[in-house]
């Protein structure tokens, strides 16, 4: 089958492209760098010609509320219109577990709009909602740091390795569209400060973790279980300690 992966040069996209090619599919890794732009529409019609499946992994380059909303609205409209014109049979998009519960966040509001565009488009679809990637735990710590103190809300957390995300996305892409949501998560669930503390210790980072009950995540107010699956989720095979051993030189 011919498959176009939007955001095919990113963290998840490069892995998905490789896995789909290993399965024998004709895959286009689409991004502005490869001449395919969902915002301007450049190269979109040509790329989608005779395409069976589109995997949308694109992410906004900025998180400012207005800009991120414009990104997902514009990209979603342009991409889905091109898919309808090309007769695409399956649209798969990567979204976020709890996106509908975190509407205090402008980014999450934009992602929910993206999901709604997909549902209303008429294109058969699968939405894969993922928990946060293990690869982003350092970034979570960094954005919550003041001086030598990391102020982390004591919310539940269940991160997933990017490798497992790519596997689940690949598997779902080549199956029939479910016209609904599939949730994926990592196998380990603990309070967020515990994950951050283990990561900092493993990397010999001397910053101090100070948990709080504010329910704050990247500046938005969230509930205690907003970042973890609400029901049945497909669980990745890579645990947090295993992931750290594979990624880091110094392990606790």
Image: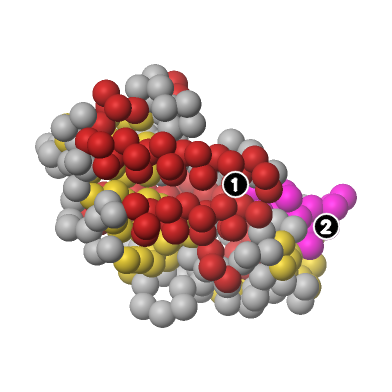
Outermost residue toward the bottom?
Answer: 231
Q: Which residue is located at x 51 percent, y 59 percent?
A: 112
Dot 2 alpha-carbon crowd within 10 angstroms: few under 14, some 14 to 19, many 20 or more = some
Camera sees residue 250: no
- State how many labels appear: 2
Q: Quadrant of residue 27?
A: top left
Where does the image place residue 39, in percent across and percent down from the top left?
49, 31
The front one of 130 and 120 is 120
Quarter containing the C terminus: bottom right
Magenta run includes residue 96: no
Q: Could you tell whether 127 is left or right of 219 in the image? A: left
Q: Find disc 1 in the rendering and name its residue.
A: 69
Q: Quadrant of residue 108?
A: bottom right
Q: Which residue is located at x 46 percent, y 78 percent?
A: 230
Q: Which residue is located at x 37 percent, y 57 percent?
A: 120
- Relative vertical location of residue 192 with respect to residue 133 in this rendering, above or below: below
Where does the image place residue 202, in percent across and percent down from the top left?
61, 54
Q: Find disc 2 in the rendering and name its residue.
A: 149
- Relative vertical location of residue 158 with respect to residue 117 in this rendering, above or below: below
Magenta run includes residue 139: yes
Quarter containing the N terminus: top left
- Give the magenta-colored segment's residue range: 138-151
The front one of 228 and 192 is 228
């Amino acid at each position: 089958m011919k498959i176009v992966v939007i955001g095919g040069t990113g963290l998840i996209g490069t892995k998905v492209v490789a896995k789909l090619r290993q399965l024998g599919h004709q895959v286009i890794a689409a991004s502005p760098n490869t001449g395919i732009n969902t915002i301007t529409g450049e190269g979109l019609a040509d790329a989608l010609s005779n395409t069976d499946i589109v995997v949308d992994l694109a992410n906004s380059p900025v998180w400012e509320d207005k800009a991120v909303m414009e990104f997902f609205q514009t990209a979603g409209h342009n991409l889905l219109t091109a898919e309808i014109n090309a007769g695409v049979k399956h649209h798969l998009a990567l979204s976020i577990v709890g996106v509908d519960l975190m509407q205090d966040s402008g980014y999450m509001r934009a992602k929910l709009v993206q999901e709604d565009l997909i549902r209303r488009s008429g294109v058969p679809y699968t939405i894969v909602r993922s928990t946060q990637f293990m690869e982003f735990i350092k970034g979570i710590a960094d954005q919550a740091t003041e001086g030598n103190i990391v102020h982390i809300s004591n919310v539940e957390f269940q991160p997933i390795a990017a490798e497992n995300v790519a596997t689940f996305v690949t598997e779902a892409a080549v199956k029939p569209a479910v016209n609904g949501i599939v949730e994926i998560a990592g196998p380990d669930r603990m309070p967020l400060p515990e994950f951050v503390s283990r990561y900092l210790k493993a990397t010999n980072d001397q910053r101090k973790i100070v948990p709080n009950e504010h329910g704050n995540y990247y500046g938005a107010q969230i509930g205690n279980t907003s970042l973890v699956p609400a029901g049945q989720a497909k669980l990745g095979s890579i645990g947090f300690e295993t992931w750290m051993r594979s990624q880091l030189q110094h392990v606790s």
